[in-house]
Amino acid sequence: MNGHAIVVGGGIGGLAAALALRRIGWRATVLERAPAPGEIGAGMSQSPNAMRALDELGVGEQARAKGAPSYSAGNLRLPDGRYLQRARRGDVTPLLAFHRADLHGLLLEAVPAGWVHPGTEVTGLRQDDRGVTVTWDGGEAGADLVIGADGIRSAVRRMVWPDASAPRFLGRTAWLGVADTSGWGASAEDVTTPPDGLSGSVTMGSGGYFLIHPISRRRTYWAFVTTADRPDLRYAREKAEVAGRLAAWHQPIPGLIAATPDEAVIHIDIRDLDPLPTYVRGRVALLGDAAHAMSPDRGQGAGQSIEDAVVLAAALHAEAGIDAALARYDTERRPRTQATARGARADGRRTTSAAAHRALAAMIRLMPAPVWRRGIAADGNATWRWRPPRLPEPTTHA
């Protein structure tokens, strides 16, 4: 079964969908409202489940070449610098860390020329027995299927799921940045080449945590997540605000903030979506944050969107009709993604609650290191154990 899909949204999920469709012989038209293709944000990590999905898209090896190994799940610290758990040489490396723009650029390069149309903001969508028509300022196009991959504030979701709840503020906010660590020496606090050859960490404080991912030999991504009384609270000097809050925390935290350009510090509020009863209505399917936006506490947001893309394409390839394929996609993806979102929300509460922080720190101290290491290894984590359906080799289109 070959066809044509319109993908609304040219982020990581939308591009992954286009690549997956190409592998099954479909054509895709990707409509991106931004004037130029790109990815907003700082860093991210991908766990083994997402890397396997990238393999099915044919870009896994290229992604591994761009990513940097991170042992953040194994290096857990307190604000005074003490380690609750410490990764060791030879541990499984469950995470690869990236700058978001690097992973996005890799996917964009793999999508066939002419498939992505920036500067196109979708304003309408209508369905009939023959397919779906999408309209925008100055044009319209029809397709067999529309994939809404346009993020947490999805226009497609608003049009086709008008009864869906708006994104929900989770009472937390985050500062993100990418520090230039190219000039850092090989000292005990060098996050790119620490003495034991490992890198990445999570420092757990009372009311917040600080994440470090090296994303190359010269750049290090960081994020500070903490509680907030209300959304949309911003500061005239965001870098100074986060630096002041963390001035007494152990190095390299103050150093990483200082090594980040003022204008590159991003401040966001953390939101997710209430579970939808279905990701499919007619010939319209939601994918990624448009369907199941989740908090970042399990590092699964982008990874789940890549999984979505592979599963959707596999269903379209295996089933005799589009309706059956979309039903299969919904049945397979909703339970997994909604369970992951619930888990991320619960993790966020535990890591930013003062009482929960004390209990968690005590538990980690008492847990034998081998038990903790097994817990972070890929074969000990149910989310990371997921394996994608197989996709055929790509079909070339004119």
Image (cartoon, grey):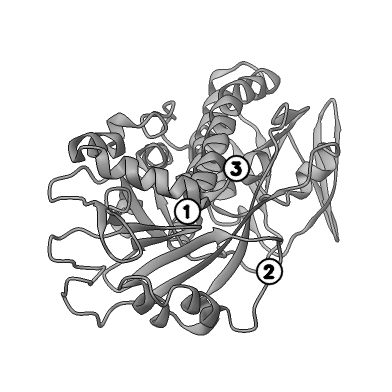
Does the residue at mark 1 contact the one at mark 3 (Cβ under 8 Å)?
A: no
Quadrant where the image shows the N terminus: top right
Q: Nearer the viewer, residue 181 or 204?
A: 204
Q: Position of residue 119 (x, y in %)?
A: 72, 65
Q: Earlier in the sequence, mark 1 or mark 2?
A: 2
Q: How many marks?
A: 3
Q: Nearer the viewer, residue 163 or 30?
A: 163
Does the residue at mark 2 contact the one at mark 3 (Cβ under 8 Å)?
A: no
Q: In this rendering, does residue 111 appear at all?
A: no
Q: Position of residue 382 (x, y in %)?
A: 39, 28
Read off the residue under disc 3: 288
Q: What secondary structure is found at the residue carrying circle 1? A: helix
Q: Earlier in the sequence, mark 2 or mark 3?
A: 2
Circle 1 or circle 3, nearest the eye: 3
Q: Earlier in the sequence, mark 1 or mark 3?
A: 1
* Dot 1 crowding, Cα within 10 Å, few <14, some 14–19, many 20+: many
Read off the residue under disc 1: 107
Does the residue at mark 1 contact the one at mark 2 (Cβ under 8 Å)?
A: no
Q: Position of residue 110 (x, y in %)?
A: 46, 52
Q: Amino acid at mark 2?
A: Pro
Q: Nearer the viewer, residue 191 or 347?
A: 347
The disc placed on residue 153 is none
Q: Amino acid at mark 3?
A: Gly
Q: Residue at x 48, y 64 (%)?
A: 224
Q: CA distance from mark 1 to mark 3?
A: 15 Å
Circle 2 or circle 3, nearest the eye: 3
Could you tell whether 4 is left or right of 265 in the image? right
The disc placed on residue 35 is 2
